[in-house]
Amino acid sequence: AADPAHVREFLDAAKCEPVTPLELAAPLSPESVVVPFGPYHPALKEPEYISLIVEGERIAKAFIRIGYVHRGIEKAAESRSFLRDVFLFERVCGICSTHHAWTFVEAVESLLGTQVPPRAAFLRTIVAELERIHSHALWLGLVGYWMGFESMFMWVWGLRELVMDILEDATGNRVHKSFITIGGVRRDIPDEKLRAYAEKLAEFRKSVLSLMEEILSNEQFLSRTKGVGRYTLEQARLYSTVGPVRRAAGDPYDVRKIEPYGAYDRVDFEVVVGKGGDVYSLVEVRLKELLASVDIIAQLVEKIPSGNPVPQRYFMGTVPEGEAYARTEAPRGELFYYVKSDNKHNPYRVKVRTPTLPNIQLAAALLEGALISDLPLIVTSIDPCFSCMDRVTIVREGEVVVLSREDLLKLVRGGSA
C-alpha cells in the first residue's frame, strides 16, 4: 500500500480513452440490423447485455450494458467488521478469492501499521501463485471450448485438477480459501508439504510444456486465434487495460514488478509479454505465465523462512481514522482496493476496482469488424468476470443516494424510485 495522494497525482496525469454512455443504438444503415446478445445467452456464464449492430455476418458496432450482477458488496462491507469483511470480499470472485482477501487486508494493514511475519508473506505469495495457475488453466479450457477445440478443454481442465488438489490440501478449500487474515495467515503449511507441492508442480510444468507444443502448432487453433480480436499496444494503453490483456500487446505492466508486495521482491522472474495483441498472443502469454508461476513457487519453497505466520488472535479491534489503498496482480490483472476508516470496528468506505472493468471497454472496440461467430471467443479472450466488475452508484440531483428495498422493487416492476 502507498500514499493515496500519489495515486491522485498519477491519475490526474494519466491519459485514457474517454468512455461514452452505452445504450441501444439505431441501425447505422438500411442494411444493418440490431441484434441483442444477452443478458442470458449460452455463450455467457454470467448475465451481461451486448447490443450488436450487424451488417451481414460482421459486427459494425457493439455496445456493452453492464450492471446485471450487482450484489451490493461494497455497501454491505460498511456494516460488517474488518475481520468479517475479509470473508465477504472473498465472495467478490470465486476464481481469484485469495487476491481479493489479500488486497483488502493489505490496505487494512497499512492503516494499522502492521508488519506481517516473513513466513506469512511467503505463504500468501505461494497460495496466490497457485490461484493464478488455476485461474489461467480454467480460462485456457474455456477458450478451447468456445473455439470448438474440446480436446484442449478436457486436457487443460484435467491438468488443473492437480493444482486444485494442492489448494485444497494447503488451505482446506478449493474455491474460497479463507487463508489470509489481518496480520498473517489462518494456518501454517509445514515445510515437507511445501516441498511435496513443488515436486508435483515440477511434473505439472512438464505437462504444460507438452501442452504448449501441441496447442500452439495446431492448425485448427491457429486458424481460430491468429489475428482474431487484434489490438495494438496504443489501444491497450488508451483503454487502461491491465493484466495479460495488456502484456499480450507488449507492455510489461505487472504490479508484482512495479510495486512488489508479499514476497515478490525475494524471487527472480521475468514479466511475460507478447507482441501480437490477439487471441493467440493471449493464450501464449497465459501458458508462459503458468510456467513462470511454477518457477516462482519453487523459489519461494526453497527460500521460505521459519517462524509462526499465524496471529496470536484474530483482529477484532478498531482501525485508526485514515485512508489507504492497495493493489495486487490478480490473475486477470491489477486489482485495486481503497479503504477509508473512521476509527470504528467497520470501514467507512471500501471501493473495489477489478480488472474486467477496464478490459471490457477494449473488448467492445475489438468486436467492431469481427464476425458474429468470433464474438464468444473475443469476449472470453479478456477473461471477463462480470460479477466481479458490476458496481452501481445512484446520483440524484448531484448527491449520491442509497436505494431502499422498496425503491429497487419499484425499478424492477417498471416504476420510478
Image (spheres, helix red, strand yellow):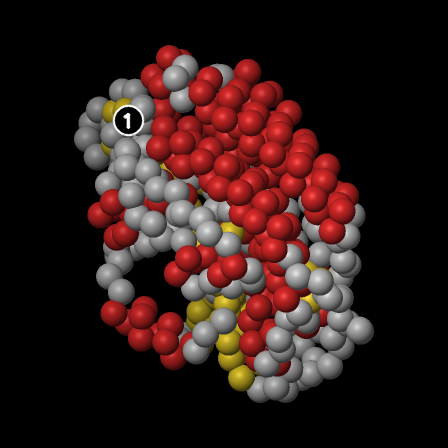
Q: Say which residue appears at 28% left-offset and 34% top-offset.
A: 276
* Residue sticking out furthest to the left: 29
* Residue sticking out furthest to the top: 219
Q: Say which residue appears at 52% left-offset and 59% top-offset.
A: 266
The residue at which mark 1 appears reads as 227
In terms of depth relative to the viewer, which is nearer, 9 or 216?
216
Q: Is residue 377 above or below residue 238?
A: above
Q: Position of residue 85 (x, y in %)?
A: 67, 66
Q: Say which residue appears at 80% left-offset and 73% top-offset.
A: 312
Q: Say which residue appears at 65% left-offset and 41% top-offset.
A: 198
Q: Identify the element where label 1 is drawn.
A: loop
Asked whether, in this view, residue 89 is left or right of residue 256, the answer is right
What is the three-letter code of the residue carrying label 1? Answer: Gly
In terms of depth relative to the viewer, which is nearer, 67 or 384?
384
Q: Position of residue 172 (x, y in %)?
A: 78, 48
Asked whether, in this view, residue 397 is left or right of residue 113, the answer is left
Note whether residue 92 is visible. no
Q: Position of residue 397 (x, y in %)?
A: 41, 74
Residue 379 occupies quadrant: top left
In terms of depth relative to the viewer, which is nearer, 361 or 301?
301
Asked whether, in this view, residue 58 is left or right of residue 375, the answer is left
Q: Position of residue 131 (x, y in %)?
A: 60, 45
Note whether residue 272 is visible. yes
Q: Is residue 24 above or below residue 21?
A: above
How many numbered marks are there? Answer: 1
In terms of depth relative to the viewer, which is nearer, 410 or 405?
405
Binning the other alpha carbons within 10 Å of mark 1 as few (below 14), some (14 to 19) or many (20 upward) gives some
Q: Is residue 165 above or below residue 93?
A: above
Residue 381 occupies quadrant: top left
